[in-house]
Image (cartoon, grey):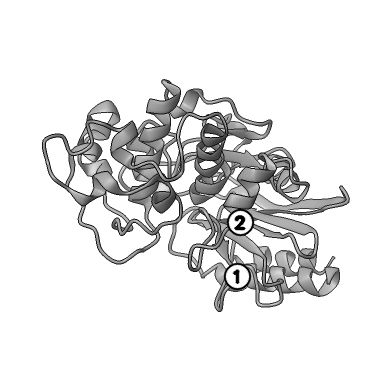
Amino acid sequence: MRARGILEEAVARGVVPGAAFGVVHADGRRESFHLGFAQLVPEPVPLEAGFYFDLASLTKPLFTLKETLKAVEEGLLDLDDPLSLHLPDLLWLKDHPLKAKTVRELLAHTAGLPAWEAVYTWGQGEALKARLLQHPWPLGEPVYSDIGYMLLGLLLERVRKRPLGAFPLPEGLTPSPPPEKTAATEQCPWRGRALRGEVHDENAHALGGLAGHAGLFGTLEGVLGELQAILEGRWLSRAALEEMLRPHGERLLSWERKRPGWHGGSLASERAFGHTGFTGVAAFVDPERGYAWALLTNAVHPTRHRPPIAPLRRALGNALAAEVA
């Protein structure tokens, strides 16, 4: 597999401290390997199979999208419901267009909400959740939005009547991994410590750990299991999967479609889709050619100021496509 040589060179050059890579095929075949280190400082820890990675924004498709579509399947909500139907206290006593934005618009990043805000500086826990619901978010042109997924997380908690951290998860996915079996992320200046087994995203941390936009941890096998289920059409019902794959501009629901500059590589088929995460993780699915792949790294360890990881992802995606196609 060409991917191994590409990743061995990337680890040797310091692009990433460690990497877990795997590819699954629609016929059930699976290949995977682990390279490098789970931690470099304060002491080196070799990366081994079974280690967890902070999945960052892979939380959006692998958790929030999936849980929202499951709720739709169960009749608890509809994709075209306005937010105010399930969050009646949203912007209480205020006339604001956010109330009419739909679940679908938030999932597809078309609601016009801001991309990001340092909400962890506003407070923590339930008080922060309440403030998120009362903040008069400005709406503009559609952009990829963490804010929208934070609100979706609050909506899911209301619909299920329990915190996100109590939602059942497949094997290999968790919001609370054992630190000694988790790849380290950043030496966090805000928290004053190196993060290992603790969510890297500051906003997710302030919201309790697992939020709608980030907070999920996963092993390579856990992520590959989800991708395999998507390939085999058993991740959700057929109807929900068909709706997930309906285009919304450059995106599907949550997932990003192949486009120029896409991190999955230019040789993927036109129906390919995927998602990335700030910590250095990525997952891509090519249903037309019957394979999917995941790259899990701790690229932000010990600092986020490292060489860009996009060229590495594209190199892997193109090498895989050339071998499989």
The crowding category of the residue bearing disc 1, from other C-alpha atoms within 10 Å (few below 14, some 14 to 19, many at least 20), is many
Q: Position of residue 68 (x, y in %)?
A: 50, 38
**Residue type indicated by callout 1:** Lys
- Identify the image quadrant of the N terminus: bottom right
User: Is label 1 or label 2 in front?
Assistant: 2
Q: Position of residue 89 (x, y in %)?
A: 22, 31
Q: Position of residue 279 (x, y in %)?
A: 51, 53
- Identify the image quadrant of the C terminus: bottom right
What residue appears at the point 62 percent right and 40 percent down from the top-left corner? 218
Is 172 above or below relative to 295? above
Q: Secondary structure at mark 2?
A: loop
Q: Nearer the viewer, residue 117 or 287?
A: 287
Is 144 above or below relative to 74? below
Q: Secondary structure at mark 1?
A: loop
What residue appears at the point 77 percent right and 71 percent down from the top-left corner? 321
One can see residue 45 in this view = no
Residue 179 in which image quadrant? top right
Q: Earlier in the sequence, mark 1 or mark 2?
A: 2
Q: Is residue 142 left or right of residue 137?
A: right
The answer to whether the residue labelled 1 contacts the one labelled 2, judged by CB atoms less than 8 Å apart, is no
Q: Is residue 269 left or right of residue 115?
A: right
How far is disc 1 from disc 2 in space, using C-alphas? 12 Å
Q: Position of residue 291 (x, y in %)?
A: 78, 58
One can see residue 253 in this view = yes
Is 233 above or below relative to 270? above
What residue appears at the point 55 percent right and 48 percent down from the top-left corner? 61
Residue 262 in which image quadrant? bottom right
Residue at which label 2 appears? 245
Q: Nearer the viewer, residue 75 or 283?
A: 75
**Residue type indicated by callout 2:** Leu
Residue at which label 1 appears? 258
